[in-house]
């Protein structure tokens, strides 16, 4: 592996979880070798704290990682493996290294109160840039130049984080995983259900329980989860509000479009009415002309008949 490859180690690293306790390190490496050479495998056995094994794997090429992620799911010993790219520490919080989400929050870095004015930050340009990472299911623009994108696959979000930093017209973007309130509840269960956290229903000494619940680590963890939950609820409400506003705007635009169509139809009806009136007048004029011609023809016919009668009388007299 070259020095340049070493600097991009993040593109070669893989986290493998939910490994059966019956599986050994060599078996996992042999399985992964189908997709590329395994350079390193940091193995963690199952113990009294966890019922599954897990490993951090370093592959020889990024293409090996891409092939593994593209051919999910992987099953070993009748157990579906949990695969995700290993994220650097600066990409996310420690707990979130092992968690996935299909949603990503994008905003301008150091953008306070929407001070950055970037008219090109619109749905079309954002989609054109970020759809290269995978299939986008939904894209919602929020206030203050923020955007939430939902992908079909959680791996797309991890790839975006691995490629940080991202720039939009020379402005650096801040990329964060976005967890829904339901996902945060799951994270809270994972974080709080640890050997250090006492089971309050297990008859543990109350003094020990109080000591753990008041510890700095536990309180900081709970505060962070609470802040994340508040932030998630706020973003969710913004998404709902934006969706409602778009629905109203769509209804208003549709109503305006229908009104314009009605006006166009009224104009066409008016034009047809005028044409019909004109045709009616022309028809009346032609009927009057026909009546005059008919009278003239009848008079001429009577005159000719009278002349013929006169000539008959003269002939008879001769």
Image (tube, helix red, strand yellow):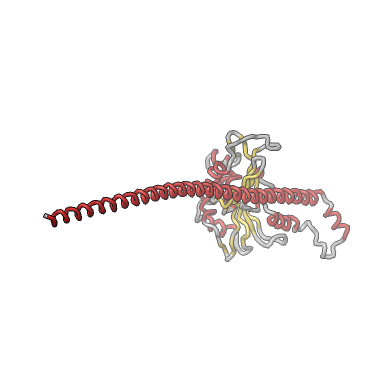
Q: Residue at x 62, y 39 (%)?
A: 173
Q: Nearer the viewer, residue 124 or 55?
A: 124
Q: Nearer the viewer, residue 153 or 77?
A: 153
Measured as percent of width and height from the top left, residue 44 is found at 65, 56
Measured as percent of width and height from the top left, residue 102 is found at 61, 52
Asked whether residue 61 appears in the rendered view, the answer is no
Q: Residue at x 64, y 40 (%)?
A: 145
For this view, does 8 lie left or right of residue 206? left
Asked whether residue 18 appears in the rendered view, the answer is yes
Numbered disc total: 0
Q: Residue at x 37, y 49 (%)?
A: 288
Q: Nearer the viewer, residue 248 or 301?
A: 301
What residue occupies the far right of the structure in this picture? 207
Measured as percent of width and height from the top left, residue 234 is found at 71, 48
For this view, does 59 lie left or right of residue 288? right
What residue occupies the far front of the structure in this picture? 317
Measured as percent of width and height from the top left, residue 213 is found at 83, 54
What residue occupies the far top of the structure in this picture? 170
For this view, does 121 lie left or right of residue 236? left
């Amino acid at each position: 592996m070259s020095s340049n490859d070493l600097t991009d180690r993040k593109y070669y690293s893989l986290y493998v979880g939910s490994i059966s306790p019956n599986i050994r390190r060599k078996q996992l490496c042999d399985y992964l070798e189908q997709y590329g050479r395994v350079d390193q495998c940091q193995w963690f056995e199952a113990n009294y704290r966890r019922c599954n094994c897990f490993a951090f794997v370093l592959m020889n090429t990024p293409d090996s990682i891409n092939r593994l992620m593209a051919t999910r799911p992987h099953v070993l010993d009748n157990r579906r493996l949990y695969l995700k790219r290993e994220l650097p520490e600066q990409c996310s919080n420690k707990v979130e290294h092992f968690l996935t989400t299909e949603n990503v929050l994008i905003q301008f870095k150091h953008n306070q109160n929407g001070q950055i004015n970037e008219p090109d930050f619109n749905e079309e340009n954002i989609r054109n840039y970020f759809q290269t990472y995978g299939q986008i299911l939904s894209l919602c623009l929020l206030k203050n130049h923020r955007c939430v994108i939902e992908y079909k696959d959680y791996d797309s979000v991890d790839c975006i984080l691995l490629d940080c930093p991202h720039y939009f017209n020379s402005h650096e973007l801040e990329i964060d995983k976005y967890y829904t309130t339901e996902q945060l509840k799951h994270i809270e269960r994972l974080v709080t259900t640890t050997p250090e956290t006492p089971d309050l229903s297990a008859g543990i000494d109350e003094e020990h329980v109080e000591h753990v619940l008041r510890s700095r680590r536990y309180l900081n963890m709970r505060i962070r989860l609470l802040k994340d939950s508040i932030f998630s609820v706020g973003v969710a409400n913004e998404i709902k509000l934006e969706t409602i506003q778009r629905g109203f705007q769509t209804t208003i635009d549709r109503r305006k479009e229908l009104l314009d169509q009605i006006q166009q139809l009224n104009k066409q009806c008016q034009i047809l009415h005028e044409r019909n009136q004109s045709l009616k007048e022309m028809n009346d004029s032609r009927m009057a002309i026909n009546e005059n011609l008919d009278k003239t023809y009848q008079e001429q016919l009577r005159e000719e008949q009278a002349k013929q009668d006169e000539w008959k009388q003269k002939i008879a007299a001769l």
